[in-house]
Image (cartoon, grey):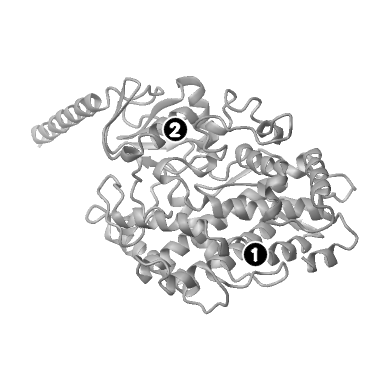
Amino acid sequence: MSHWLLSISVAWGILFLVTKLYKDRKYSRLPPLPPGWLVIGNLLDLPLSSLMFKKLTVWSKEFGPIYTSRTLNKRVVVLGNAKVAGEILDRMSSKTGGRPEQIKQSICAEVAILPSCNVTHCGEPCAELHMTRSLLVRLNNTPQYTYPKRVPWSWAFSLTRIFRFVSITHRFSTSAAMRTLYGLEGMSIDDSDPSQKLVEVSDRLFETVKPGKKGSCVTFSQSTIDWRISRKSDAFYQQVTNLYKQCYFSEAPGSCISRDLKEKKYPGLDDVNSVWLVGILLLASQDTTKVALQYFFLAMLLHPEVAREAQKQLDTVIGSRPPTFEDQSNLPYIEAILKEVLRWRPPTPGGLAHMTTDDISYEGYLIPQGTMLIDNIWGMTHDPELYPDPEKFDPSRFLTPENEHRSPSPDTRDDYLTFGHGRRACPGRDLVLRELWIVCTYVLWALEVRKPMDEHGQEITPDPDAFIDIGAVVCPSVMWATAIPRFPNLAELMRLA
């Protein structure tokens, strides 16, 4: 028996060494690797449960803007500045546009892949994907889908009280998305919240696409996964599909994206893919808008001088009438605030993972096919060479001395790095930016946002570094604020808009 066990041990040892030598040769030209343990690599160094982007940024300062991290037998290449990300993810996008499979038969928790899409093992995009992304560009730029005026004013007026960041921004982002995508009426601040199931779905899906996350409830493969996990995944997929169907097939007046899809104004997608297309747009716009607005309120509480500067420009340009989208070109400071919010606290600081679909060479390194690439957005937006004094909230960095828009630096994607790179850049970016611009402008025009008081009459100052990590999205901690109308007849001004 002892000889048999010894033989098995020797065989396994030889197999391990051969496999290791093969992989070491395969990965011998990868970017530099932080020191780690023999078998588990850097597993113990990475805070996989929360705020992994901060550790990745620290490593970028030590090992350079491109380096490799190893956990067990997986090697991940981290891209830590805008120049490297632009060269690899943008200009090599045909080979770096893959995404690790995380949803049943390539249904990813993002708009990149829809149910009928067939992809290779490394995530090569299919014809349906290209058609879908082309459709999204058209949807984002269709005039009738611009954000309706009546939701922001009613929402902004409801802020004239003490409010909690999380609830108010959730209700706005959900109302905006439901109106634009499904034609449904928005929620007032005092209504019951019918979207709680949507929140649960978005939280679970964003948790699965976090870099380094296995996605225990929605990770799928054909034969290598335990059947119990697969059955749980099937049930979750069906739950999400039914939820999106309920919204998609609702009867709603007026023009909206789902109605035009049902009327086949954009041919090429069947009902199932259309349901998921609009559902994923809802997921992306709802969560990105919600978290970005929370950081906007946080910034205004901590930097009231920025709010006053914006209100000075608003008073000069539009006076006492409510703002509209037609005012956007005349309010450069508002857009500078929006850019700075998304730079200072990007909603998805760790980015969403890419995967190489072919071997690529970069500055002497060889990154093999099937390697995961992490687009570390936080490291890029807090790069002092690109944005000096990155922890300082300073919208003027995006303006010239003449108060005009400064030309963005190369590879910053118009200073909106938070929306990602290459073929996997967020296709709903324009929709999100329109929503953010109109509500931030309304809030600054209509209200003074102040810190709340404690029981002793002292201001409560929120901590800008207190985060809640819910997966790919990272939110500020729960905070309160007080809003004071800037005009005595604010309600009348808004109703006349």
Check disc 1 and give the amino acid type: Pro
* x and y, in percent, of residue 157 in the image: 78, 63
Quadrant location of the N terminus in the rendered image = top left
- Please tell me which residue is depicted at 66% across the width and 57% down the height of the picture: 169
- Please tell me which residue is depicted at 33% across the width and 44% down the height of the picture: 98
The reply to whether residue 164 is in sight is yes
Mark 2 or 1: the one toward you: 1
What residue is shown with label 1? 148
- What is the crowding at mark 1: few (fewer than 14 residues within 10 Å), some, or many (at least 20)? some
In this picture, residue 367 sits left or right of residue 490: left
Q: Is residue 78 above or below residue 355?
A: above
- What is the crowding at mark 2: few (fewer than 14 residues within 10 Å), some, or many (at least 20)? many
Q: Which mark is residue 86?
A: 2
Q: Which mark is residue 433?
A: none
In this picture, residue 268 sits left or right of residue 400: left
> How far is mark 2 from mark 1, CA to CA?
35 Å
The foreground one among 81 and 255 is 255
